[in-house]
Image: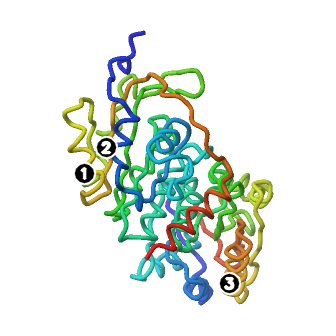
Amino acid sequence: MSARNYAYTLNRREIVKQLLKGRDDMPVVTGLSSAAYDSVAARGADHPLNFNLHGALGGAAMVGLGLALAQPEKRVMVLMGDGDVLCGLGSLATYAISGANNLSLAIFDNGIYGETGNQLTATSQCVELGEIAAACGMPVARTVDSEDQVDAAVNDLLNAQGPVVINFKVSPKHPGHLAKTRDGVWMKLRFRNAFLGQP
Amino acid sequence: MVSEAESAAAGSWSRDVYQALKDQGIKVVGFVPDGGMKEVIDLCLADKDMKTIPLTNESEGPSLLAGCWLGGAKGCLIMQSTGVGNVINNASMSEVCQFPFLALVSWRSSWAEGNRWQVPMGQRCRDYFKMAGFQVMSVDSADEAGASVAAAAEEAFNTLNGVGVFFSQRVMGVKRFLR
């Protein structure tokens, strides 16, 4: 296999754990599959402020934007894979003009569609999502591909004036599935009760 | 080079629609524009209490409005009938999670359409919208516009369903193409 993603080494689960540690009051929206399981690995399957999509590929980015516009005082964290972001690539342009300075998107770019047979995505060839986000005019946007860059990236995702987009080059090794609900109505009610009930 | 000109001046119906959105507490407006909705969009853009943003694709609409609802805010999508096809996949989230989805649709090919490329979606958009699990309403006269939007919003946010309000070109004015 000559695709460049086989050189990616970052551990997505460890990055998400670092990002969400001690941030139980931060709303998190994830895209499909691995990004959703990463949030479960970090916070548990019953965390009320996880909203995981299990369909609508590409849609998580805009769920995050809607949430950020509705609650401009609270940091909103979106976790997505590269295939998910590619499906809604235009949303990076929408982010850039949105003025949502409380919005952060962490992309876990493993270069493959990991749930469907490891077909290569466009990012495994030549497409750089961090550079696309930067070219859109995002206040903070870059690609992170080594351990020594992770702390600063996590700090920006949590604290910088956004929208912030960090594209992490992560190992294509599948980190495994975790049990969680796919009941959308339940997740929505759980989220709203916890989030809107906050002081 | 084909130049286009708007013929019919939109009347007070645009202000009625904007006022209905305000009265219903709409805070976020996403749009992919059509000329027929120009005045409604301009009123929303000028309103500092509303966040009104252009979307790159109508598919962003259902997700954006779902996020608004998670955050306790109401939003709406303004688009033309050609955009209905683009929303359908993401509309599955609205149905599965019972998110409200309010869409104001400028209904091309509803009256004296002048662009053949608008006809396929114009003729089928309401059927597609219904197949996506949503409800449809029509506005055929200007004096119904405000009340129709208010009724659609009441239904969308109380029944947690998708409701599209399709505005006939008899209301918005017919787009004239210079030949």
* Residue A166: assigned label: 2
- Is residue B61 rendered to the left or right of residue A78? right
Depth check, mark 2 against mark 3: the one in front is: 2
Whether A149 is drawn above or below B24: the answer is: above
Mark 3: give few (<14), some (14-19) or many (20+) Cα within 10 Å.
Answer: some
Instruction: Please state which amino acid type lies under the numbered disc 3.
Output: Ala
Callout 3: SS: helix
**Residue at screen point 53% across, 61% down:** B64
The numbered mark, 2 or 1, whose residue comes first in the sequence reads 1
The reply to whether callout 2 and callout 1 are in contact (CB within 8 Å) is yes
- Is residue B80 rendered to the left or right of residue B126? left
Q: Name the colouring of the figure.
A: rainbow
* Residue A156: assigned label: 1
Instruction: Please state which amino acid type lies under the numbered disc 2.
Output: Ile
Give me the chain letter of mark 1.
A
Real-space CA distance between mark 3 and mark 1, rounded to the nearest whole angstrom: 42 Å
